[in-house]
Amino acid sequence: MTIHILKIAVGIDSVAHLARVQQLRLERAQGVDGTGDLRHLTRNMPRRADLVLDGGSIYWVIRGYVRARQAILGLERVTGREGRRRCAIILDPALQRTVLVPHRAIQGWRYLDADGAPVDFNEKAPASTTMPVEMAAELRALGLL
């Protein structure tokens, strides 16, 4: 059974902004020998790592909504700059937009069951999912979508 991770994208304003920040991180990681991975450091290693690595993704909450996801390729124990143990979540650089789902602020990350994960945004989806993002968000907040 696959489970996912839900995480706030701190300091990020949009999916495009997240993509730019991650592209810079990936270029920096590959700068030394060209083999670096896209990593996101977090304090704790998931206790259910085997289920996360069984096809799990990280779902990004941006400005109050789950807006995108990335496949998790691996989890690795690392030592942070200050000498403390961390977990490096190794991510697929490809960002997949999701249908907007409102989510309150959380600290750290949370597990997300596959049943509760937002579906991927599809360009051929019904008109209700292809309207402008802000309009769809407002209509969802009003309970109209």
Image (cartoon, helix red, strand yellow):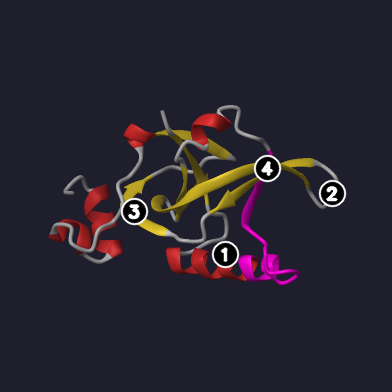
Point out residue 104 in the picture as x, y percentages from the top left corner.
44, 42
Q: From this view, report whether residue 29 is shown above or below residue 1.
A: below
Which residue is denoted by mark 4 in the rendering?
76
Label 3 crowd (10 A; few <14 / some 14-19 / many >=20): many
At x 30%, y 47%, the residue is 119
Quick one: SS at disc 1?
A: helix
Label 2 belongs to which residue? 82
User: x and y percent of residue 34 in the render?
Assistant: 68, 69
Picture coordinates of residue 114, whole percent (x, y): 37, 35
**Residue highlighted by disc 3:** 98
Q: Residue 84 carries which label?
A: none
Dot 3 lies on which element? strand
Q: Which of 8 and 40 is in front in this view?
A: 40
* In front: label 1 or label 4: 4
Of mark 1 and mark 4, the one earlier in the sequence is 1
Mark closer to the observer (3, 4): 4
Check the image and report above or below for 28 versus 87: below
In the displayed structure, would residue 28 be above or below residue 108? below
At a point 60% along the width and 50% down the height, the residue shown is 90
Q: Distance between the residues labelled 4 and 2?
A: 17 Å
Amino acid type shown at disc 4:
Glu
Q: Identify the image quadrant of the N terminus.
A: top left
Marker disc for residue 22: 1
Q: How crowded is mark 4: few (under 14 residues within 10 Å), some or many (20 or more)?
A: few
